[in-house]
Amino acid sequence: MTNNLYACFRSRFPADENKPFILQANGRALTYADLEQQTAQMAGTLLSLGISKADRVAVQVEKTPEAVILYLACLRIGAIYLPLNTAYTSDELGYFIGDATPGLLVCAPAKAEQLAPIASIHNVAHLLTLDGTGSGSLMSHYHSVAPETGIADVSKDDVAAILYTSGTTGRSKGAMLTHENLASNAAVLHSYWGWNAQDTLLHALPIFHVHGLFVAIHCVLMNGSAMWFLPKFDVREVMDLLPHSTVLMGVPTFYTRLLEQDDFTRTSCANMRLFISGSAPLLEDTFTRFRQRTGMTILERYGMTEAGMITSNPLEGERVAGTVGYPLPGVSARLARTTAPGETGVLEIKGPNVFKGYWNMPEKTAEEFTDDGYFITGDIACLADDQRISIVGRAKDLIISGGYNVYPKEIELIIDAVEGVRESAVIAAPHPDLGEAVVAVVVPHDGYILTEQTVLDSLEGQLARFKQPKKVLFYKDLPRNTMGKVQKALLRKECSLLFP
Ligand code: ATP
Ligand code: MG
């Protein structure tokens, strides 16, 4: 039996291969038979370009079925797929290309000219294009080669993909994920979330990140069922497709956007069985309003580039707001340096889903593992009596003010409850006396005018003095990246000179 992840998917194809895998709102569909034939054709294309096992294929393209085919074709031949955020500029791409040294770079036609010198400096053998309609020079090659119908033999430990982390806390690192990492996580999620033959996924996430590429697509492939494949999250398009879907995976902003629609109701969700949220913390307010409006409870889970999914709220049983549930089967999780339930500590994990290491960074990799082989996630968590995990924040966001530890999330939750506050982010700013001072960035609800004093007054009595913000700033929106993560590093930079 081969360890190739594509072979694992193929063994799960529906008996009737004329059933759809990808459905598009424009009426186009791609069946499982098409999938098999087109990935073989794309595998032949890659081989004809001289790409072979372990070569990197870097891809920065719009979300199309062809991009999915390209990913799966890389698996088939044992090449390493390397998706890149479409928001990255050509300059930023230089770092990733230089680091990963791919043999092939596939980009949008509009970027090809700017990327040509970068590709050439880093000796990338081929620079080809793929556009948002599924055409481009890659496809010209595709139509002129013979298919490769075989599936390469790989070992469990062979790298299937390199995904760069989101760069929220510093420079993005390339996480090497093996065929086994991906296959084990896919199997666990498929069973944990109760996938069944009637399921249809509504796929509105980007596919350059773990959430959209692995969690979403792998569950569908393990299930041999169909997904609606939207080029991006368009709230009205999602509303139109909800009655024809059963599962939605989203970042928290998907859910706040849906709640802004007056016609988003119990009726619109009548066909849905599961709403899943992750990639960034889901506010308790969103969780509660969603439940009131639809009668359904969002299932929050937690994961990261380096390990895929780590914990999940249960399918059956209570889903608790503000928590990310239990470690998934096969994952052991513990908190560093804690002794009693309820204490916070950095979350460490071990399991078949945990990555092989950072590409080109053996030292960084070694630093992030404990002596007994646990991966140090860098997230601060809290473990309840019943083993439920809550993510309190990132170790790097922890504020040390006047020698005291301040957890931003504790303060954010209290500020968020102040009347007129939509959301907030609490960060550290360098301070001459305290080392770091607590700074709150507050986003008011439309129509509310808040002042620093009103916010500070409402915190009085609720927070020890050392946790109270030394400064409150008002923003129209918090800066977020495409995965909905608040860019605290950016806020810290903007606030670096507040206390000269
Ligand atoms: P970098 O590692 O480059 O700083 P990043 O950690 O944001 O970037 P990702 O791997 O995309 O890159 O994100 C994983 C992180 O997202 C987790 O470590 C965690 O901090 C956060 N996260 C994911 N899901 C949740 C969740 N449900 N609740 C809270 N945080 C979450
Ligand atoms: Mg990270």
Image (cartoon, rainbow, N blue to C red):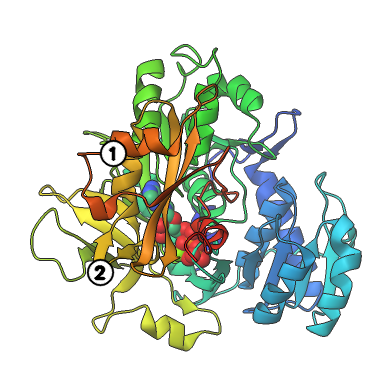
Whether pointer 2 and pointer 1 mark residues with C-beta atoms closer than 8 Å, the reply is: no
- Residue at the bottom extreme, as displayed: 363
Q: Which residue is mark 1?
A: 459
**Secondary structure of the residue carrying numbered label 1:** helix
Up-down: is 131 above or below 353?
above
Residue at 51 percent across and 73 percent down: it is: 176
**Residues packed near mark 2 inside 10 Å, few (<14), some (14 to 19) or many (20 plus):** few
Q: Nearer the viewer, residue 485 or 433?
A: 433
Place of residue 492 in the rendered image (x, y in percent of width and height, measured from the top left): 50, 60
Place of residue 440 in the rendered image (x, y in percent of width and height, measured from the top left): 42, 48
Q: In the picture provided, is 215 more to the left or to the right than 25?
A: left
Q: Quadrant of the N terminus?
A: bottom left
Q: Nearer the viewer, residue 63 or 480?
A: 480
**Secondary structure of the residue carrying numbered label 2:** loop
On residue 403, the disc is: 2
Callout 2, which amino acid?
Gly
